[in-house]
Amino acid sequence: MNKREDGYRNIKSGITFINLFDEVCIKKNNSMIIQYSGTFKPPQDFFEDCIIKKTLKFLNLDNKINLEINIKKNIPIQAGLGSASSNAAALIKGLEKLEIIKINKDYKLYSQLGADIPVFLYGKNALVEGIGEKVIKHEFPKYFFLLVKPKIG
């Protein structure tokens, strides 16, 4: 891992998916609403400049469309488990299902928004390189995981 001028580090890493995820529900609405719920719901205004707002801005949809976006937080915030990036990817996929956007299949484009977003759009186990924008299909052996999240950190 070497540090780049943009502050990111070049990495080579394996990403595997486990049965732990936030639930993102998107529907058209007459006003813009972003709500969090669930076990790991952040404090009010914790995400004032959240990945959801950044994603809408990145897609040039901020102030152009009204949606109700409900996110049930099942992944602890700031735990390094990719919840923000996976939520952004879920939003992008949801907007395509609602026929609001067409996803650019060159997932590297979305790394400008978040380094992990391309692998979450890909949605399968993979090796990632660069800052995470290079996604390479890879099958891993079956692993078992134990996740521990202390109250601090």
Image: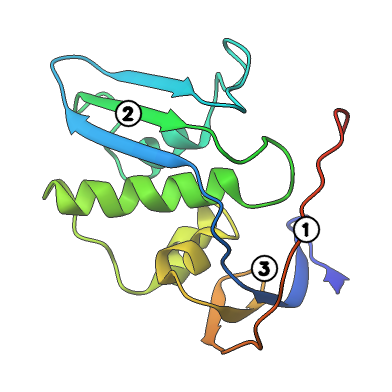
Residue topped by disc 3: 131
Toward the viewer: 147 or 112? 147
Q: Is residue 92 above or below residue 30?
A: below
* Residue positioned 20% across, 53% down in the render: 96
From the image, state whether disc 3 or disc 2 is nearer to you.
Answer: 2
Toward the viewer: 71 or 29? 71
* Residue positioned 86% across, 73% down in the render: 2
From the image, state whether disc 1 or disc 2 is nearer to you.
Answer: 1
Q: CA distance from mark 1 to mark 2?
A: 30 Å
Q: Is residue 152 above or below residue 137?
A: above
Q: Position of residue 118 (x, y in %)?
A: 48, 66
Q: Position of residue 124 (x, y in %)?
A: 47, 75
* Residue positioned 47% across, 70% down in the render: 108
Q: In the drawing, what numbered circle is on residue 128?
A: none
Q: CA distance from mark 3 to mark 2?
A: 28 Å
Q: Secondary structure at mark 1?
A: loop
- Residues at badges 1 and 2 in contact (C-beta under 8 Å)? no
Q: Residues within 10 Å of mark 1 (few under 14, many from 20)?
A: few
Q: Is residue 132 above or below residue 55?
A: below
Residue topped by disc 2: 69
Amino acid type, mark 2: Ile
In the picture, the quarter occupied by the N terminus is bottom right
Q: Is residue 150 left or right of residue 112?
A: right
Residue topped by disc 1: 146
Q: Is residue 81 left or right of residue 106?
A: right
Q: Secondary structure at mark 2?
A: strand
